[in-house]
Image (spheres, rainbow, N blue to C red):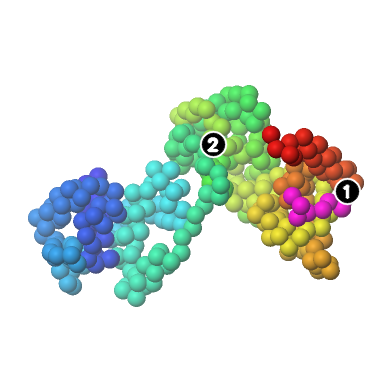
Amino acid sequence: MRADRLLALLLLLQNRGRLTAPELAAELEVSVRTVYRDVEALSASGVPVIADRGPAGGYRLLEGYRTRLTGLTGDEAVSLFLAGIPVAAAELGMGSQLSLAQLKLQAALPEPLGEQARLVQERFHLDAPAWFREADPVPRLLTVAGAVWRQRALRVRYERARGETVERELHPLGLVLKGGLWYVVARAAGGDAEPRTAPAGPGAAGGSAEADAGVRTYRVSRIRGAEELTGTFRRPPGFDLAGYWDASSRALEEMRFKGEARLLLSPRGMRLLPAKFGAVGARAAAAAGEPDEDGRCLVTLPVESLPVAVDDMLRLGTDAEVLGPPELRQGVARAVTELAQRYASTAGGV
């Protein structure tokens, strides 16, 4: 809406001082021509906007002028909970509310606090998505988010991990953004617990086992169709979204790992461990023994099923030696032998 944009322009000038038309256009995501028209509209309404000419010029407010139009709307107040993750706010359709809310909040702060807030915004940034992976396309995210917010049931077509598609009526309890991927935590109507992406965990602090019963996690990108139904559903008493997610994540990790590998890692292998295996690798590296005379460290690393574990060990290349268990060491040896035979025939060139 133009009224919101005019207020945003006014607050930008109040909070940041002199800004050029291109700078304002970039902040407001409009054309420079639109900025010119908006500045004229502000001036016509009595706001003392001064245009300084020349290379160091730009627009600024008359010294001493401050607006008192800094109250937050309901949507703007809600959007502040997403202040650290602007990409998520934009995906949920709240990007403009978040920008205007932050401007209003900064304008309402006393000058010393406002300066501190500006410095924090300049020098700290949270980037939620994971490295080296594109975020999932989530065309049904707004529909799902609307149902979560209004406490409405959803009829969905959901593609399971193995590829088959099922229809479910879900009671969505909350949204979670994890590593750049969106998940909806929901209960299937009628008590059908399938499909599930992460297992329901035991009751956590602030919740209960009864509240979590039948609750499952669904990946939003796998929702192939979504329709919000009329009427509201009853939320499980005492359900705690953060507590459920923490317990569910821990239970999923316990299910994922089938055993432990004992490794001797070179110094480079120790550095690779967190990069290749994330938090699990970082914990294993932190608990490693002292380096031997060759600089290698003994590490115990949680691993998945044998075929997956063999592939994981190969990712470390010559910087790791598998000491055990025997079946994993043998599996890596077979894979290395097969690779050596495959490449031996081309060692002299093609």
Q: Residue lying furthest right in this view?
A: 326
Q: Residue at x 81, y 68 (%)?
A: 290
Q: Amino acid at mark 1?
A: Pro
Q: Which residue does the numbered mark 1 point to in the structure image?
A: 325
Q: Amino acid at mark 2?
A: Val
Please name the residue shown 65% across and 51% down the image: 246
The residue sitting at the left extreme is 44
User: What is the distance, in whole Å, between disc 2 and disc 1 at their CAs?
Assistant: 38 Å
Q: Residue at x 17, y 48 (%)?
A: 33
Q: Please state which of residues 69 and 32 is positioned toward the viewer in this rendering.
A: 32
Secondary structure, mark 1, is loop
Quick check: 13 above or below 340?
below
Q: Nearer the viewer, residue 298 or 282?
A: 298
Closer to the camera in the image, 71 or 29: 29
Can residue 140 be spotted in the picture?
Answer: yes
Chain part drawn in magenta: 317-325
Q: Which mark is residue 270?
A: none
Q: Earlier in the sequence, mark 2 or mark 1?
A: 2
- The picture quadrant where one finds residue 214 is top right
- Please identify the quadrant where the C terminus is shown: top right
Rendered location of residue 42, percent (x, y):
14, 56
Q: Total number of numbered labels?
A: 2
Quarter of the picture containing the N terminus is top left
Write down the residue under mark 2: 220
| Helix, strand or loop status at disc 2 | helix
Residue 9 placement (x, y as % from top left): 23, 56
Does 323 appear in magenta? yes
* Residue 30 pos. (x, y %): 25, 47
